[in-house]
Image (cartoon, rainbow, N blue to C red):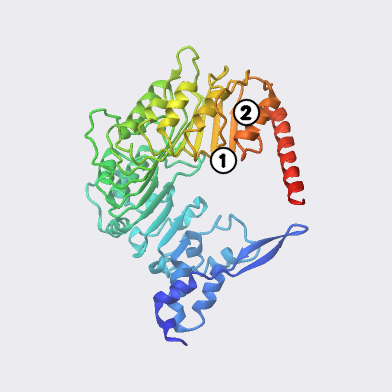
Amino acid sequence: MHQALLVPEVLLEIFAHVTETILKPFGPAGAIVISLYRESLAALATTCKAFHDPAMDLLWGEIDIESLLGCVMRLHPLIYRNGRLWNWAEGVRPLSADEVHQFLRHSSRVRSLTILSNRLLHLFSVIPAKLYDFPRLRSLTISTKYLNLFLSHSLHRRYLGTVDEDLQSIVTCCATLEHLYVITPDAVNAIDSTADALSRISDIVRSCKQIVTLSCPLFDWAAWTHLSNLPTLTRLDVGDTRSDPTPPWPLERDIANFSPFSNVTALSFLLHSAAYAITVMQHSQFPSLKEFKMDVDFLPLREAEQLFRALSNCKACETLEQIRVYSLYHEYDPPNNSLSVIPHFHCFTHLRTLHLACFDFCINLDDNILLEAMSNWPHMRDLDIEDLRLHHSPITFRGIFTAIRLCPQLHTLRVSIDNRTVNIDVEPIQHTSLRILELKTPWFQIANAEALARIIFSCLPRIGRVSGSIQCDWDEVNMHLKSLKDAARHATGAASNT
């Protein structure tokens, strides 16, 4: 054996590229590709002593809880037998104290652990927390139903002020975690989505000292304060729509400002309402933020104004590249629900993606507003603006062609447009980057469809078809556009043959 193969780091690099696959018949005449990565690592681990530890480290490095349960002799045939049922654990008694040691046989090798399956929860009902020892764990994906395994019962009931010795190893484990993902189960089974559960999440968040990426339901202001002081944190995804829509902590407007989240580049919220996120944004600075996303069930006009103002004041004007805000329909009051959203985003001069889908109000957008916005976004690549607009849009074809000249990298454009007239009296210029054009129209027929198709063919050579809210709106334009492109290809082919 070559001496290089005796160096564990070399073997790890080689074994990481094991990509053996097989084709398995699927259906009457098909096949699917099955990876043999884990089987190959297992074979390498039994080849010789030098290969054993590096192969085992990779084999057990990224694992889910069901694979660890396969180490328990009593459960192994239930998990790995052919034709195993998805509910194999139903009626199976919990692990005994002796079986816990079998379960933890390879725990010292685990770096990434996924614990999501609720149907396995009863198997751990008698395991003491102190036996959960994963010293190399760096990434944890866990259902809120399993949080009881990570916090002592005394802390759950909150009548003791200190962490007991059984929990200390878990706190130490969380302190070294780099990636933590806490998932709330589906609404039918989410019995643990209570203020008490959210408080436990806050306790776990505050115990993380080296966290890099964090995704979990809501947590309290003390946890936010803790995170704002962590230089390691780069990504933060907060909230879910399955837990209580009302945070268990008052949304005080006079809470102290958090320290700047100096290295956070991605921030997202998934919420019932925007109040929690607004409070966070009003008391935070994100000087390195590149991506902001908000998914909210409803976003009334007043909260939208507060959210967008807070976003523009969070010290991310020189860094923010992506903004995505989505809300579902709540209630619509046409005379009063109109908001000038776009000017709040003028300060983001490096913006590349802007998705706004807000169905609680209309977004003020016309030719002049669009032109001014595009003049502030020279790097824009993906612009998608959708609202609950019941009447025609004030944006015209002339406004579209004038504005896109200011964004030479624009790839995707989705907006509403007034399609009643085609009047493009601007100097024709080719835009060679635009590939996706979706123009929502209130009228079923496009005026001067053939003329518009010729303009699109001349100025937007990468556009093969135009889509809209109702595809038949653009059928005639697309028919003419296809004819023009077919004729151009035929002419090019004929010229090349002469």
* Residue 496, percent from left and from top: 73, 50
Residue at the image position 35 percent from the left and 58 percent from the top: 129
Q: Give the mark nearer the N terminus: 1 vs 2.
A: 1
Report how far apart the C-alphas of labels 1 and 2 lie in the structure. 24 Å
Query: Where is mark 1, residue-wise?
Result: 432
Q: Residue furthest top?
A: 335
**490 shown above or below 169:** above
Q: Quadrant of residue 29?
A: bottom right
Residue in the foreground of this view, choosing between 141 and 478: 478
Residue 249 visible from this viewpoint = no
Residue at the image position 48 percent from the left and 36 percent from the top: 407
Residue 42 visible from this viewpoint = yes
The numbered mark at residue 394 is none
Badge 2 element: loop
Residue at the image position 53 percent from the left and 18 percent from the top: 394
Residue in the foreground of this view, choosing between 240 and 487: 487
**256 shown above or below 449:** below
In the image, taking residue 286 as reference, residue 454 lies left or right, namely right
Disc 1 residue type?
A: Thr
Mark 2 surroundings within 10 Å by alpha-carbon count, few (fewer than 14), some (14 through 19), many (20 or more) = few
Mark nearest the camera among 1 and 2 is 1
Q: Residue furthest front?
A: 498
Query: Where is mark 2, residue-wise?
Result: 469
* Residue 371, percent from left and from top: 46, 26
Disc 2 residue type?
A: Ser
* Residue 159, percent from left and from top: 25, 44
Q: Quadrant of residue 86?
A: bottom right
Residue in the foreground of this view, choosing between 460 and 198: 460
Mark 1 surroundings within 10 Å by alpha-carbon count, few (fewer than 14), some (14 through 19), many (20 or more) = some
